[in-house]
Amino acid sequence: MVILKLRKLPDRKLAKITISVSAELRQALSDYAALYQEAYGDSETVAELIPFMLETFLESDRAFAKARRDGLPAADTSKKSRHQPFSGSE
C-alpha cells in the first residue's frame, strides 16, 4: 500500500476559490489524485484534494506556525501585488 503524506480526506464542506497553476503542476496534481485513489480506494478530484494539501503543507511549516504564535504583522492592503495567488471567497 502507498503511504502518502496527505491523510484520507474527512467529510467536509468547502468554500470555493479560483487559482491558476502551470501545466506541469496541473499534471502533477492529476498524478497525485490518481495515486490517492490507488492508496485509499476513493476517487477525489484535484479541486477536492488541494485544500487539504495546502492545510498539510501549512501545518508542517514550523516557521509559519511560530509566526502565527508570535503574532503575524498586519497585512498592508494598500499595496497591490502583481501576482494574485487566488481570488474568490474564503
Image: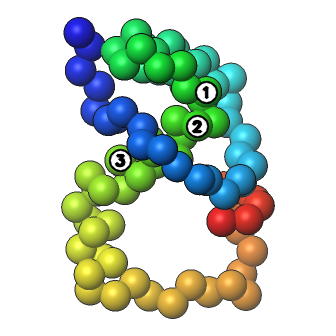
Number of disc labels: 3
The amino acid at mark 1 is: Thr
Q: Which mark is residue 45?
A: 1
Tell me where residue 70 sits by quadrant. bottom left
Q: CA distance from mark 2 to mark 3?
A: 14 Å
Where disc 3 sits, the SS reads helix
What residue does disc 2 label?
Answer: 48
The amino acid at mark 3 is: Thr
Residue 81, how many percent across, how many down? Answer: 71, 68
Q: Quadrant of the N terminus?
A: top left
Callout 1 touching callout 2 (CB < 8 Å): yes
Tell me which residue sits at (61%, 53%) in the image. 14
Q: Is residue 37 among what the camera can see? A: yes
The amino acid at mark 2 is: Glu
What residue does disc 3 label?
Answer: 56
Tell me which residue sits at (71%, 54%) in the image. 17
Residue 32, how many percent across, how many down? Answer: 47, 20
Callout 2 touching callout 3 (CB < 8 Å): no
Q: Is residue 4 left or right of residue 42?
A: left
Tell me where residue 69 sits by quadrant. bottom left
